[in-house]
Amino acid sequence: IRSCEHSGFIKIHSGLNKNKLINLGMDSREMNRLLDDDMYIDQNKFRSWMESIVTKTILNLLEIKDNRYLLKINNNEYIIRIIKSGPAFTFEVEFMNGKTINIDLVPVLEFSKDVPNMHNLSEFKTFQKQNWFAVPKPVTQVGRKCICWRTCFYEQEKEILSKNGQIKQIIRLVKKLRDTRNWKNIASYYIETIALHLLQDEPNFGKRSCTLSFMQMLCYMQKTLINRCLYYYWNNRFNLLDKLHFEEVKNISNKLGKIIKTINESIENNPYIIAFHILNTEEYKQFLEWLNKQPSEIENNEYSRCILF
């Protein structure tokens, strides 16, 4: 593992000698296809290689139409469609009952040592799992970006956020608000990173009522957007919001501020004001219909309910 000029990224050297590699046979030639001239693993070549594997696999299935394929497992049938976004592949899986789920597949390289320099290295050493990942995520800056890999500490972040189960619930609610408001530029990882920083600044985050913790998260998120600064949790020189345009961040920040203001002003008289903002129009309509049902109807209803206290 070698350091990279881009904060939050590393380079991966194969440890091979190009002159010797030529004489090592078929396996070496396959390996050489993933390397650049200086024997670093090229993320573009790696992504292309992974894409070819996924494509070959999916093409073995029966195509129905419009790039949708039929998968049969134990007398069950599933319709699969693949959507590619950056380094990830999203499998859109439709069940026999018509329900659909999305499964994200992100190709990574896993390492168990040579932890790169990071801001929270002392904290990292306390985690149960010490493995970390290198993700072939493109660098936005110029230079030899094809050999720069984004560091990923998914297992460690999951351990931090799972210490209080309520935090994960709050993150899901904020993501739902994001989706309802169509704030496409606010990536899920941004929301999770905001929660990590908030927990670091406020150790009691998530230990109060869900409503108070949710509002605390929204206020912290708005502050982050106003400052247009969200540092990568593991490297405080890498601002995740750098690539977002000023106007779009300002626009989302203003809308979020109005939502916070409306909730604070209305929640005493309208206990469902948070649901009003989180749910889309149709979902909120169904929610109100559900509330108006008789208790006996609710007990027999198969739908689950999420309530903020």
Image: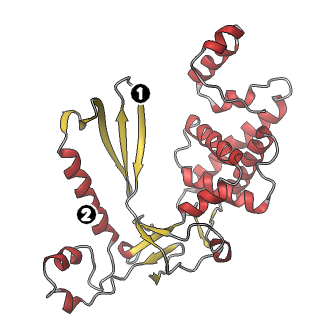
Residue at label 1? 99
Choose between 15 and 84: the one closer to the eye: 15
Q: Is residue 264 above or below residue 25?
A: above
In the picture provided, is 56 more to the left or to the right than 212? left
Q: Nearer the viewer, mark 2 or mark 1?
A: 1
The secondary structure type at the circle numbered 2 is helix
Query: On the picture, is 131 further left or further right than 265?
Result: left
Residue 305, quarter of the rendered image: top right
Q: Is 105 drawn above or below residue 129 in the view shown?
A: above
- Quadrant where the C terminus is found in the figure: top right
The quadrant in which the N terminus is found is: bottom left
Q: Is residue 289 visible?
A: no
Q: In this image, 202 relative to 38: left or right?
A: right
For the point 25% across and 63% down, the residue is 49
Q: Looking at the image, which residue is at 65% across and 53% down? A: 162
Give the mark count: 2
User: What residue is shown with label 2?
Assistant: 49
Q: Secondary structure at mark 1?
A: loop
Query: Where, by quadrant of the figure, is residue 177 drawn?
Result: top right
- Residue 32: x and y, percent? 22, 78
For the residues marked 2 and 1, what is the alpha-carbon distance in whole angstroms?
Answer: 31 Å
**Can residue 2 be seen here?**
yes
Lower sequence index among marks 2 and 1: 2
Within-10-Å neighbours for mark 1: few <14, some 14–19, many 20+: few
The correct choice, above or below, for 97 with respect to 101 in the image is: above
> Percent x, y for residue 155?
55, 61
Q: Is 80 situated left or right of 101 in this image? A: left
48 up-or-down from 55: above or below: below
Observer-nearest of 142 and 303:
303
Which residue type does callout 1 highlight?
Lys
C-beta proximity under 8 Å, tags 2 and 1: no
**What kind of residue is marked 2?**
Trp
